[in-house]
Amino acid sequence: MKKLFLVQLLMIFCVSLIAQITPFERDPTKNTTATYTETIAYYQQLDKIFDQLKLISCGPTDSGKPLHLAVLSKNKVFDPVLLRQQNKHIILINNGIHPGEPEGIDASMMLVRDLLKNNIIPDNVVLCFIPIYNIDGSLNRSSTSRANQNGPQAYGFRGNSRNLDLNRDFIKTDSKNSRSFQEIFNTWKPDIFIDNHTSNGADYQYVMTLIETQADKLSPVLSKFMTEQLTPSLFSQMKAKGWDMTPYVDHVGETPDSGIEAFLETPRFSTGYTTLHQTIGYVPETHMLKSFQQRVKATYALMECFIDFSKRHSGQLAEVRKQALNQAKLQKEFALNWKLDETKVDSFHFKGFEAGRKPSDISGQPRLFYDRTKPFQKNIPWFKHFKPTLTVQAPLAYVIPQAWQEVIDLLRLNGVQLERLKKDTLMNLEMYYITDYKSPAKPYEGHYLHTQVAVKSVKQTVQFHEGDYMVRVNQTQNRYIVETLEPQGVDSFFAWNFFDSILGQKEYFSNYVFEDTGAEILKNNPELRKQLEEEKSKNEQLNKSGAAQLDWVYRHSDYLEKTFMRYPIGRLTSN
C-alpha cells in the first residue's frame, strides 16, 4: 500500500513537471508558440501549484472569453489597494495584442514559472501578466498572415473578431478587450507598462529593438528618471546578457543609414494611453527576421532586466511617480499635438548590414536588399525629440451634458471624478464651434478619423440640466481629461467621431418665405448689411448668387440654430 502511494505521488509530481514545460520548450526546433487554450491551461496549472500566483478572470473580450491577469506576489497579497499601501511597485506586462507577434506569450510563460519555481519574485515588486490580450486574434491561427516574419510555425492574426487592431483602440474603445484592459490598468495603477511586440521593416544585426514612452510627453520628473536611469540601464543590462539592443528602427530615409526617428505614440496606442496616467511605457519589438527562438529568449532577458531594475530602484520610482501624479493635478498647459524636432539630432552607434540594389526576379527592376555578408557599425543620426504644435490652457472644469453617456462611461472607467449638477443651471461658459476639419475617404479602424480640426471660441450662456456632469481639472487624470475632451487633440473623442451628430444641421428655411424675413433683418441691422457688402466685394461667387447671399444672411441671424457645429462640452474658465 505504501509503495502504491509513493508511485502515485511520483506520477503526480511527473505530471506537474510536464505541465510546467511550455509548447515552445517541448519543440526541438523551438519554433512553436502556445495556443490560447494551452496558454490559459498552463497558467491555471501554475495557479494550482504555487500560492504566490493568482490567475484572475478580469472581464469580457469580443471573443466571448474573459481577459485573464496572472499576478505574482511574493507575500501572497493580491489586493491592489493593499499592495500600494505596502509600497509595492507594480509592473504590468501585456502579451499578444498582435497574436502574430507571440514572443511575449511564450517568454512570459517561462519567466513566470521560473520566478515561482526558484522562489525569486522580488519582495518589493508585484508582477502582472496579461497572458494573451487579443484572444480572438489568437484563435484565428495560421502560418501565412505574417509574410515577412521568420516563424513560428503557426500564430494568431493581427485583427480581432471585429477586425480591429487593438493597438489602435485604447481611446476610442470599440472593443470589450479595451474596456477590460482599462479596468485592469486603472485598478492596478502600474508604475511601468510593457507591451511585447515584433517589428517589421529593415534588416540589421539586433534581435531586440525598444520603443520608450515619448520623453517629451511625460512629466519632467518621470522623463528624467526614464531617460537618464531606466532606459540606459536596460541597454546596459541587455548588452551584458549578450542581447545588444537598438532603439526602434523607424528610418527617416530608405535604409537605417539615413538615421532613425523615435516613435510618437499617441493615446490610441497602448503606451500613448498609459502615458496619460503618468505610467512609463515600453514596447519591446523583436526583429522579425531573427529566429523565433532568439526572439523569445531576448524577450525573456529584457523582462528580467525590467524586474531587476525595478527591484533595485523601487523606492525611487515610487517617489518620482508620486511627484509626477502631483504635478499632473496642478498642470495648466497641455500639448495636444506634436511633430518631430529636426533641429535636435542625437547619434546612435548602429550595427547594420549594407544595403544595395539588384534586379528583381519578378519585375527585373532594381530592388532593395540587405547584404548580411557585409555587416557594419557606425554612428547614425537619431531624431528622438518632439515639439508641440498645439497647446491649450486647461479650464477650471468641463461641463458635459448627460446625453453623451459613452464619454461619461469612459471617464469613469479611467478613474476621473465627476460631479452631477443638482438642479437646472444657466452657466456662462467658453464654447467651441468647429470651423473646419478633414476626414479620410476610407475608414481607419472603423472610424472616419477627423484631423486638422479648427475651432472658434465663443463665450455663451448655456442651459445645463439636473444630472449633467462637471469634470474639474484638478485630478491626477488631468492629461486623460484634457487630451480626450479638447476637440483638437490628435486622439480626442471628437477626432474619433463621438460627437459627429453635432456636425449636421437640423433646421433650414424656404427661400421664398425667408426672402422677406432676411430683408427685414438687414433693414433693422445696418451693420450686418455693411458686412454682407464687404463679403460680396471679396467673394465673386457670393456676389453673383442670390441664394448664397440669402444663406449668408440666415447664417448670421438668430434663426440659425446655436447648436449647429457647437461642441457640446463647455469650458468653465472662471468661478
Image (cartoon, rainbow, N blue to C red):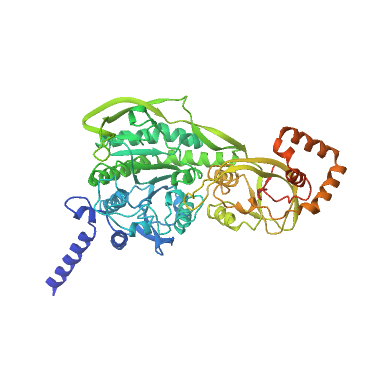
In the rendered image, the vertical position of residue 508 relative to residue 271, given as above or below: below
Residue sticking out furthest to the right: 524
The residue nearer to you, when weighing 440 against 464, is 440
Is residue 204 in view? no
In the drawing, does residue 392 fall left or right of residue 211?
right
Residue 226: % across, % down: 42, 35
Residue 176: % across, % down: 46, 59
The residue nearer to you, when weighing 411 against 526, is 526
- Give the residue drawn at x 33%, y 59%: 140
Q: Quadrant of the C terminus?
A: top right
The residue nearer to you, when weighing 66 against 370, is 370
Q: Quadrant of the N terminus?
A: bottom left
Residue 3, by quadrant, is bottom left
Residue 155: % across, % down: 29, 54
Residue sticking out furthest to the left: 3
Residue sticking out furthest to the bottom: 1
